[in-house]
Amino acid sequence: MRNRNVLISGAGVAGPALAWWLRRYGFAPTVVERAPTLRDGGYKIDIRGVALTVVERMGLLDEIHANSTDVRTAWFVDRTGRGIAEMDAALFGGRTGADVEIMRGDLGRLLHRATRSDVEYLFDDSVTALVDRPDGVEVAFERAAARRFDLVIGADGVYSTVRSLAFGPHEMFVRGLGHYVSIFTVPNHLGLDREERLYAEPGRTVNVYSTRQDTAAKALFLWASDPLGYDRRDLDRQRDLLAAAFAGAGWQVDRLLAALPDAPDFYFDPVSQVHVDRWHAGRVALLGDAGYGASPASGQGTGLALVGAYVLAGELAAAGGDHRTAFARYDGALRDFVARNQALAPNNLRGMVLRSRAGVWASTRMIRLMPHLPGRDRMVRRVTEPIRRAASGIELADYPA
């Protein structure tokens, strides 16, 4: 096997998943992560379609189901908090059959536990320079001594450091979708028990939910906006922008925003996608959000990361470590699948953030009436079919063990 020593930047979902498969095939991966420990929390994510096959082949499917959110119902409320429409939580999330919802932090923990015994992890560190040579990549780190690796994989998110070093600045690849999202932990003053509360006004939506594992709740804010000017490291400015975006909103919004100063896991970002014409350059390749982020609005970011890790590791194994052949096959095998799943986001956003009061009224009334309408099952299939088709839109190869 050639090119056995592989550096993976990012210990979220894509990085540890790739490390798991690389170890299976006899490679020696090292994972570097900027955060001092595993990133806990985050939002709930879905695993569906062929991604279920990937985690089943990893032997993790039962553990993932055991750690599912178990969220059961979603209630739409009006300004006073009165429930105006109820929806099954799985249908609200576009899940069918064996699809499962889990917190992002819980999935990351399971992947880390499955790899930590035979994969080197470097926490509280990051890549600062790459020199791609014919016989390997010289890598400089913020803290650790410089090292040489055969290959480097950027699995470090939408604002990937590896991509910026090897491919170009973020502005070349990150495309905003005209919306922003923020999420953070709040006290569960609504007394939610594995359920969601949704409140919508024209141009902005709030979703508060509790999961089986958490006594607190998560508050997710999603809104339409022109590009906002701020420093990604300036959390106070981001908090101010969120408060301004939801000023004057009804329901419990003011009380939820009051939890901002104490939230340990505040997250704020534009809803963006990553589009890169080619996911490899020399001995460097991109995986997951770093190469083809589909945005949270797609519901498929995690699926793309898991499937991408399976395909990338498998192609490297099938090519005997020949990175030129493997990277090209990885790109070719995944490109159409990625495009299908990225295409989900714009349409999903139109349903998640409604632009008029009439749209809010019509949407909630339809949800309220749906259980009583003839042809209900056909209507449900129309809602879930696009994401089911996209999530299953690739045939997984059986790579040699």
Image: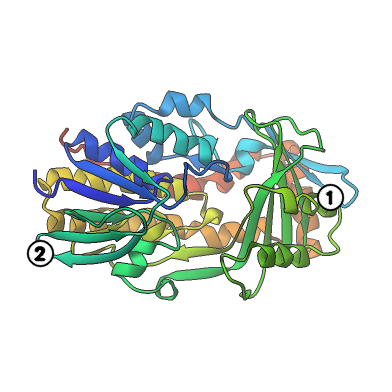
Q: Residue at x 26, y 50 (%)?
A: 7
Task: In this rendered view, identify the residue nearer to me: 192 or 237.
Answer: 237
Picture quarter with the C terminus: top left
Q: How is the image coloured?
A: rainbow
- Distance from disc 2 to disc 1, alpha carbons, whole Å, reads 58 Å
> Dot 2, crowdedness within 10 Å: few (<14), some or many (≥20)?
few
Q: Would you say 217 lies left or right of 388 here?
A: right
Residue 310 picture location, percent across and down: 29, 42
Q: Residue at x 82, y 37 (%)?
A: 190
Residue 267 picture location, percent across and down: 61, 55
Residue 359 image-quadrant placement: bottom right
> Dot 1, crowdedness within 10 Å: few (<14), some or many (≥20)?
few
Which numbered disc flags the more N-terminal residue, 2 or 1? Answer: 2
What amino acid is at disc 1? Arg
Q: Which mark is residue 9?
A: none
Residue 217 image-quadrant placement: top right
Secondary structure at badge 1 equals helix
Task: In this rendered view, identify the residue nearer to me: 223 or 351.
Answer: 223
Secondary structure at badge 2 equals loop
What amino acid is at disc 2? Pro
Residue 300 picture location, percent across and down: 47, 49
The image shows residue 169, relative to residue 130, as above or below, that is below
Task: Report the residue marked by disc 2.
Answer: 134
Task: Report the residue marked by disc 1.
Answer: 255
Q: Would you say 229 lies left or right of 312 here?
A: right
Picture quarter with the N terminus: top left
Residue 184 picture location, percent across and down: 66, 49
Residue 282 image-quadrant placement: bottom left
Q: Residue at x 73, y 49 (%)?
A: 262
The image shows residue 109, relative to residue 164, as above or below, that is above
